[in-house]
Amino acid sequence: MKAAVVHAFGAPLVIEDRPDPEPGPGQVRVRVEASGLCHTDIHAAHGDWPVRPNPPFVPGHEGVGLVEKLGEGVTHLSVGQRVAVPWLGRACGRCEHCLSGWETLCEQQVNTGYGCDGGYAEKMLAWADFAQPVPDGVSPFEAAPLTCAGVTTYKALKVAGVRPAQLVAISGIGGLGHLALQYAKIAGAQVAAIDVTDEKLELAAELGADLLIDARKDDVGKVLKAHGGAHAAIALAVNPAAFEAVNSGLRRGGKLVMVALPAHGTIQVPIFDTVLNGTSVIGSIVGTRQDLAEVFQLHAAGRTKVEYETRPLASVNDSIDEVLRGQVKARIVFDLGTGR
Ligand SMILES: [Zn+2]
Ligand SMILES: [Zn+2]
């Protein structure tokens, strides 16, 4: 089977032939149909973050495909069933986080495409308990971006406790932002969409944004404040200045939810304003299996629309460059050529 492999941080990925991986106890082998390109994969391939993966490894945590082989003890999945293999490859199931519904904070977790090989391959392994069944009628190309971009933004809105009639600012309308916007609308909120390209602001308008803020010329904080301030701001743009801008546009009691992960990013949080205004700064990382199940349920019910463009896996290095240049409207999904 073919896989795109990182051999050294920052070096181009190499497409190579590898033997089919054998599922161990509790695992399944998945014949990958579609695999999304998330910015995290680029950080993984570049070794940008304090905790680094160990090359050689296969990135990718938006792999979707059909179960091809069951490992020992797997009884709840069947061969031919479509599953998604998310960032949370496995968690311990026993710690305080796992037991309190926060498996995404488990310190023993293994992350797909980071701590084990991921979805940039024709075949991959998954821990059966963490492979999420994809409902009938949801295409693998739409399921792929939902597996990280979807669940991550859905969870961020849950963490913010968004309620109907609130004003929610979505900073960055890309692979994540276009989905965040839709989840905020589903929650009944008014949505302010913030970006720096005409194309993405147009996409936000098409998806029902109530207020468009062009951060190239508008003062984001002032515009939000002119509308009463945001009850919640979801920071998705990979740029620390954008985090500070939306933080300054919160209303009293508002919440900044940090989601994007700029390499070595830090922001200044003014103590005086934070104390007087009672605002919160919260980090939110991906989502649980239950969150992903809900994301798929909403999509199967026709409530969300996924913007994506397909590419062959062979174009992996060019695709990464496109994302880094900010030229991709929504999400790149690799078509492994096995799904149709
Ligand atoms: Zn991701
Ligand atoms: Zn745990």
Image (cartoon, grey):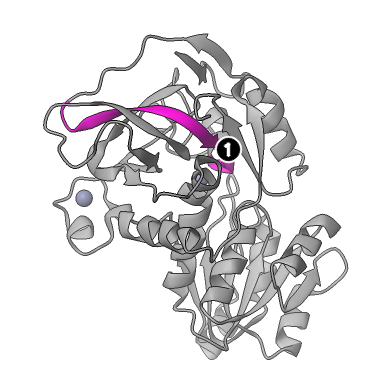
Q: Where is 293 relative to 250, above or below?
A: above
Splitting the image into 4 quarters, where does residue 246 fall?
bottom right
Dominant secondary structure (helix, strand or loop) of the stretch shown in magenta:
strand
Q: Residue at x 26, y 47 (%)?
A: 107
Residue furthest to the right = 217
- Disc 1 element: loop
Q: Residue at x 19, y 26 (%)?
A: 71
Residue 193 image point, x, y percent: 71, 70
Residue 45 image point, x, y percent: 55, 28
Whether residue 67 appears in magenta in the rendering, the answer is no
Residue 67 image point, x, y percent: 32, 31
Camera-side residue: 299 or 150? 299
Q: Where is 41 relative to 186, above or below?
A: above
Write down the residue under mark 1.
Answer: 37
Q: Where is 240 relative to 48, above or below?
A: below
What's the amino acid at mark 1? Answer: Leu
Mark yes or no: residue 115 visible. no
Q: Residue at x 24, y 35 (%)?
A: 78
Whether residue 39 appears in magenta in the rendering, the answer is yes
Mark yes or no: residue 134 visible. yes
Q: Is residue 173 left or right of residue 189?
A: right
Q: Is mark 1 within 8 Å of ligand 1?
A: no
Give, as a single range, the part of the protein colored magenta.
Answer: 25-40
Residue 109 image point, x, y percent: 28, 43
